[in-house]
Amino acid sequence: RPGKIRRTLRWTWRLTYLTFGGLLGYTAWVIYEDRHPQDQVKPDPSKKTLVVLGTGWGSVALLKNLDTENYNVIVVSPRNFFLFTPLLPSCTTGLIEHRSIMEPIRAILRHKKGSVQYYEAEATTIDPERKVVKVADNSEVKGSIAENEIHYDMLVVGVGAENSTFGIPGVRENSCFLKEIDDAQRIRKKIMDCVETAAFKDQSQEDIDRLMHMVVVGGGPTGVEFAGELQDFFEEDIKKLIPEISPRFKVTLIEALPNVLPSFSKQLIEYTENTLREEKIDIKLKTMVKRVTENTVEAEVSRPDGTKERLTIPYGLLVWATGNTIRPIIKDLISRIPAQANSRRGLAVNEYLVVQGARDIWAVGDCAVAGYAPTAQVASQEGTFLARLFNNMAKTESHEARITELSTSLNVQPGNAAETAQEIESLERQLKKIRDVKPFRYSHQGSMAYIGSEKAVADVTWWNGNIASGGSLTFLFWRSAYLSMCFSTRNRVLVIVDWLKSKAFGRDVSRE
Ligand code: FAD
Ligand code: NAI
């Protein structure tokens, strides 16, 4: 019996060694593959040129799922990385370091097969008549050529949107936006600048109050998430590090509508507003900002009796988060396509995401109007759909070419007629299946938002129904959901390390 136990133990050890050895070997192989991608080939003149504009959610989902061997792919974007926007508000306070949510586009493209080129440039004009995109290198360093043209056979426009200001005077000059990584870094610096200036020796009381007042305009998910992160930063770090001025710190959230988070369910709106108030965030609803100066926000409040009151609010930091507007390149393209005459919010696309009135141009994400909200979820599903569509189109073309080739050989070599006919029949059957691509349909998985003090709200679609939840458990769900959605394992590891680091040592308040 002891011998049997010994044998069992020996086998258990051997199995454990084998499993760990296998896992280690696999990890080493994955890392090796990642670090040693295949050499990329030169463009093949027999293939179509597919130009993709942008490296955001829509374009990257397309590139990730596209069989790039079928096309000569050219990617153009002024941003040489993919940005995981859902965690961008956390970068404004240093909870997460900005590089943790960036993935270099070259690292993504390097692993694709076929010819895939990337140009760091801004597309300035799309000429649908000549099928060319004009591109410009607007970076600080320039060579002898800073502008050029790229010809396309197929074009995917995924340039996203800009921050809307509704033409309100003073907004562009005086406020920070929250859309790109630079915005988050600017906000992070400005918060600390305001705090340190407020803490300056013998600073006036009036200035301390102004500098410690952080105003957020727009009660959509961006504004709410940022306000929550800011209040957390104050409670968890600033209060401990600079206690002498901490009672003066205040966050105000201004929203023109009667409630925040208009796209969430009623009970979650109520929960969010109550939680924000508990966190001591001042919410000003039915308040429309009309003008911004260097140190003040001028707003109009609608009172219940229908009267309007003008408010002047001094601020140290102003973050403007009032949604999207279209980019100049999209405005220009709209003006070149008569069928787009009524497009105001972006390029009108059909159910296959083809830009209406244009040939061989598709649009995805925030720059396309397909009847869905401008979210990462929509953009990513649209990109994935287009990849499937293009993979199918390439297969269709190759099958058709093979059928033509076989049909010709039938006449030349009648000896193999039965075999050839069988192959043609099989290809035609496959073709029928491939051609049967269903139109794009968005599948809504739900909406989530962080609301501060380790609480989140989620409207999640579940078995054709909807579950609305808010609180600390939802926060854990929010964190795990976004962690799983991060672009790469590298991003996931970095984000976890950042969370742990901030929990253990606090946020880094040094100003770069
Ligand atoms: P983007 O991701 O904005 O990418 C556009 C790309 O085009 C960029 O690479 C840009 O550099 C490039 N580009 C711009 N101009 C040009 C040009 N002229 N030529 C070539 N390239 C150009 N959505 C969710 O679903 N869930 C969330 O939790 C969520 N959180 C968010 C948090 C924040 C702070 C923000 C700002 C947005 C959030 N969103 C979220 C919305 C989501 O980020 C957008 O809907 C999504 O990024 C749209 O994807 P896109 O590909 O259309 O554009
Ligand atoms: P938004 O369009 O959702 O909200 C902007 C808010 O600003 C609106 O409620 C509007 O009433 C208000 N507003 C406009 N002008 C104003 C003024 N002058 N004064 C006061 N308030 C004013 O914009 P947001 O939050 O930037 O989101 C953009 C898109 O990105 C949305 O589709 C959103 O769903 C998505 N997003 C999703 C997130 C998530 O799911 N967690 C996080 C961030 C963005």
Image (tube, rainbow, N blue to C red):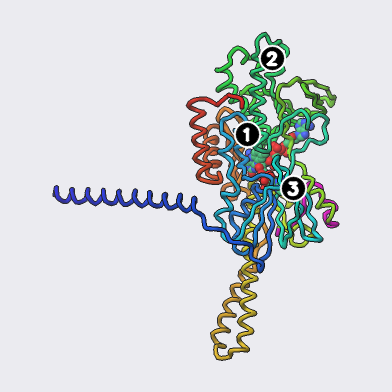
The residue located at (59%, 63%) in the rendering is 69
Using the rendered image of the protein, determine whether residue 469 is visible from the camera's viewpoint: yes
Residue sitting nearer the eye, 171 or 352: 171
The residue located at (38%, 51%) in the rendering is 25
Q: Earlier in the sequence, mark 3 or mark 1?
A: 1
Q: Label 1 sits on what residue type?
A: Pro
Main secondary structure found in the magenta portion:
loop
Q: Earlier in the sequence, mark 2 or mark 1?
A: 1
Magenta segment boundaries in residue numbering: 337-352
Name the residue tied to disc 3: 146
Name the residue tied to disc 2: 208
Residue 313 part of the magenta-drawn span? no
Q: Quadrant of ligand 2?
A: top right
Q: How many marks?
A: 3
Looking at the rendered structure, the secondary structure element under dot 3 is loop
Distance between mark 3 and mark 1 Cα atoms: 34 Å
Residue 340 part of the magenta-drawn span? yes
Name the residue tied to disc 1: 89
